[in-house]
Amino acid sequence: MEMEFVVIVLGMLLSCALIQATFSFFGAGKPKNQPPGPTPFPIIGNLHLLGEQPHQSLANLAKTHGPIMFLKLGRINTLVISSAAAAKQVLKKQDLVFANRHIPDALTAHNHSHHSVVWLPVGTQWRALRKIFNSNIFSGNSLDANQHLRSQKVHELVAYCRRASESNESVDVGRAAFRTTLNLLSNTIFSKDLTDPYDDSGSKEFRELIGNMMVEAGKPNLVDFFPVLKKIDPQGNKRRMGRYFGKLLDIFEELIKERLVMKKLKEDDVLEVCLKINRDNPDEINRTQIKGMFLDLFAAGTDTTSNSLEWAMTEVLRNPHTMAKAKKELEQIIGKGKNVEEADVMRLPYLWCIVKETLRIHSPVPLLIPRKTENEVKLNDYTVPRGTQVLVNVWAIGRDATLWEDPLEFKPERFLTSGIDLRGQDFELIPFGAGRRICPGLPLAVRMLPMMLGSLLNNFDWNLDAGISPKELDMTEKFGITLQKADPLCVVPRPLS
């Protein structure tokens, strides 16, 4: 937990005595058969237990209190799910009653939560927006039609690394992957690059902007635990998020205006599809919702994919036998020095195992997007109160020793003989969630990740900085809604030997 947060919490402990009656933790409202959990302190509840890495702290607490655990975070009841069986109950068997969102205050900036398919409650508006995602952006036909764009962007990524190789410069893998996914999305949506594919400066600004958004949305915020503080915004989370959102929304507004005055329309891109739907049926989607949809796409689509590629490359470098095995498969199946195309992926089982293992041990969204119970709910033999925030700790599930042999070891081989998939049916591995609120971008992510990873491995040898051994790579996580690598992976691409 960051120092600013600790200082404010301690200040509240000293100043809130006069309103302690308002924050009643032990009154008659406590339901029977409440799930087990640590005893809360007055006022702060269990906030002191979150630590700097809440996903890790909650995983450790679950070892004591069980996979269905109840905490009091300030004024907010919180249910933490830490097993595959319990996740299946919440995300599949009782999906509808757990389908709505607990919305962090920062996400209400610019009223984004009112226009976002991520945060809207399940209902008419959510279904209309989700239909646009599923039918016009992430459907099989739409993705097949844009296959050439993904191939082009992977070629540009390889070309960028080749330039670095020729000048003996290191590549910031996360930033390079971010630039690739940013321009892929911008071409899919707007038919243009948002940044130079060979220049770090523009993509650096975008990555910092979106990375800051993800950290802001995920880090502890007093307003979320004590809603009475909303008007004050003591940590400034919402104000900062408002600036971040505003920058992206202004970019989208200019691109929409530019399109509206064009004589020749881009018939195949997402913007044109959305504008057509808006012209034909304004009640289905309006301009504000269009921009909210684009904000969701860029925030979720760029950060998660680039983080996952960076973790995958880090793990492969830390495990030379994995690198050698992957390179051998690539050489035998498609030939050394060639880019991986989408049609190749199904013929590269070990590469696909590396992707699965990366997503198991480095979940892109460690606690998934928080859910909320609208009414009192029965879960197994427990009673979950109305208005409870629900966190599914997929980071903990991916490291559960009852599910995985040697869970902390990076072993892609475990998937060679396993039928476990990551598309939301096998709850041991749900990096994209499951049920009706599964990440709509899953079909794109599972196409892009193996293409980028395989192409980087098959075109270059990769050297760490002098004096650093693979096992010395820093694996510290930077917590937010998404899980970034705290220390960027910078490595030098070398011509193939």
Image (cartoon, rainbow, N blue to C red):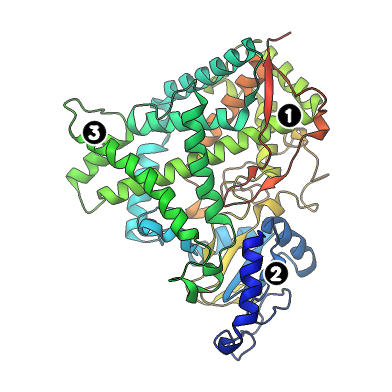
Crowdedness near tag 3: few (<14), some (14–19) or many (≥20) residues, C-alpha within 10 Å: few
Q: Nearer the viewer, residue 330 or 184?
A: 184
- Where residue 158 sits in the image (x, y, percent)? 56, 17
Disc 2 to disc 3, how far (Cα)? 50 Å
Q: Residues within 10 Å of mark 2 (few under 14, many from 20)?
A: some
Report helix, strand or loop for mark 3. Answer: helix
Q: Which residue is mark 1?
A: 316
Residue 162: image x %, image y %? 59, 13
The tag earlier along the polypeptide, 2 or 1, is 2
Q: CA distance from mark 2 to mark 1?
A: 36 Å
Give the farthest residue toward the top. 497
> Is 394 placed above or below 94 here?
above
- Mark 1, other Cα within 10 Å: few <14 / some 14–19 / many ≥20: many
Q: Amino acid at mark 3?
A: Glu
Q: Name the residue beneath numbered marker 2.
A: 48
Identify the residue at horizontal 29%, vertical 42% (top origin): 253
Residue 383 makes an appearance in the image: yes
Would residue 137 be found to the left or right of residue 302 on screen? Answer: left
Q: CA distance from mark 3 to mark 1?
A: 43 Å
Which amino acid, by three-letter code, is at mark 1?
Val
Instruction: Give the structural element (helix, strand or loop) at label 2.
Output: helix
Q: Position of residue 496 (x, y in %)?
A: 70, 10
Kind of residue at disc 2: His
Q: Nearer the viewer, residue 426 or 45?
A: 45
> Which label is found at residue 121?
none
Residue at image coords 68%, 20%: 492
Give the label, 3 or 1, closer to the camera. 3
Q: How many numbered badges does the structure rendering display?
A: 3
User: Can you say whether 457 is above or below 114 in the image?
Assistant: above
